[in-house]
Amino acid sequence: MSEHVQVNVRNRIGFISLDRAKALNSLSLEMVRAITQSLLAWRDNPGVLAVVIRSTSEKAFCAGGDVRFFHERGRATAQGGSALLEDFFTEEYALNYLIHHYPKPYVAVMNGIVMGGGMGIAQCASAGRVRIVTEHTRMAMPEVHIGLFPDVGGSYFLSRVPGHIGTYLGVTGETIGAADALYAGLADVFIPTEQLPALTAMLELTTKPGIRDAILAFAAPFREQADPADSMLAKHRTLIDRHFAADDIQSIITGLKQDAGPFTQNTVMLMRQRSPLMMCVTLALVRRGATMCLAECLRMERTLVRRCFEHGEVLEGVRARVIDKDNSPCWSPTAVEAVDQELISSFFASVWPEYAHPLRELK
């Protein structure tokens, strides 16, 4: 087990608490393994009826994977390979799959920052899921900002939100709040942060008849505090659907530039900061993911991860954003116009024979 993951069972509910506050609960390989071990142990245990995953800090639920680890081990990958990096992504994606298909109610308390890998351990697809947001929720799939793509099942859940919102979120890496998350179908209920201790007390003592119904009833009085109809995404839905329906990034940018409103111009500014290559790859990823099952999406993403580290875009992005903090990544190619279809397609080219894929057992 990891020192950064606290696990206990109370009132027949398994609680997983992420406890790596200084790193905003960024996931390490040990944390991935600790979460997986707990979920597997509880899956067929009649003494555990549901699972709640949360953070010990109000600042972040989980800010993603440990990008410093990615950079350190990724340089070794570029020179021939790093077994630990390979293990991290294989086991993280297997965990995402386990969570999506978990047979018991799965509750994610997404208080604070929820990004990248944090989304992967929160976006459960099972019928018993409850994804909770608060006034402090800051949600994003910001991988294009560091030269990566929205993984951890992003090709699956982003391609299934209304209209072209998923494309917008993946390509721009924009951060959204609670009302936006509810509008996009990336959250289920809003509960104020100050009410979370009362929620915990209720879950630990009096949950009946079922945890999902109990949480929905608890959250009902706070529904109007985060109205999806008033969200940024709702207000700009027409513009998002119009521009992000285009077939390539250059067309999206051109359309946005021709629309003089503040939202479209701000979106252009955001996209100028992102990796041109990975925006193009992300667009292709989300479009492909719309016709795939979750297992196929995760296998596709696992291939893309290997290609990203081979290319080196993510290493440069993490260097510029996190290591040196000069915020001046040298993207390759440097402009969207220089990204051709052959280069995009190369990221999707198979790395392993089908029988040897590290996620071949996912059904």
Image: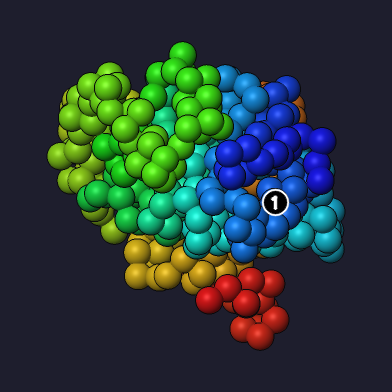
- Residue where numbered disc 1 is placed: 38
Decide if residue 334 is on the left or right side of residue 90: left
Q: Is residue 61 visible?
A: yes
Locate residue 62, reporting x and y percent: 60, 34
Q: Nearer the viewer, residue 132 or 339?
A: 132
Locate residue 351, reporting x and y percent: 65, 74
Locate residue 63, reporting x and y percent: 60, 33
Q: Disc 1 residue type?
A: Ser
What secondary structure is found at the residue carrying circle 1? helix
Vertical position of residue 150 compared to residue 247: above or below: above
Q: Is residue 300 visible?
A: no
Vertical position of residue 325 compared to residue 239: above or below: above
Decide if residue 261 is on the left or right side of residue 90: left
Residue at left offset 62%, top offset 63%: 44
Residue at left offset 65%, top offset 34%: 17
Residue at left offset 54%, top offset 55%: 99
Q: Give residue 238's quadrant in the image.
A: top left
Locate residue 213, reporting x and y percent: 35, 41
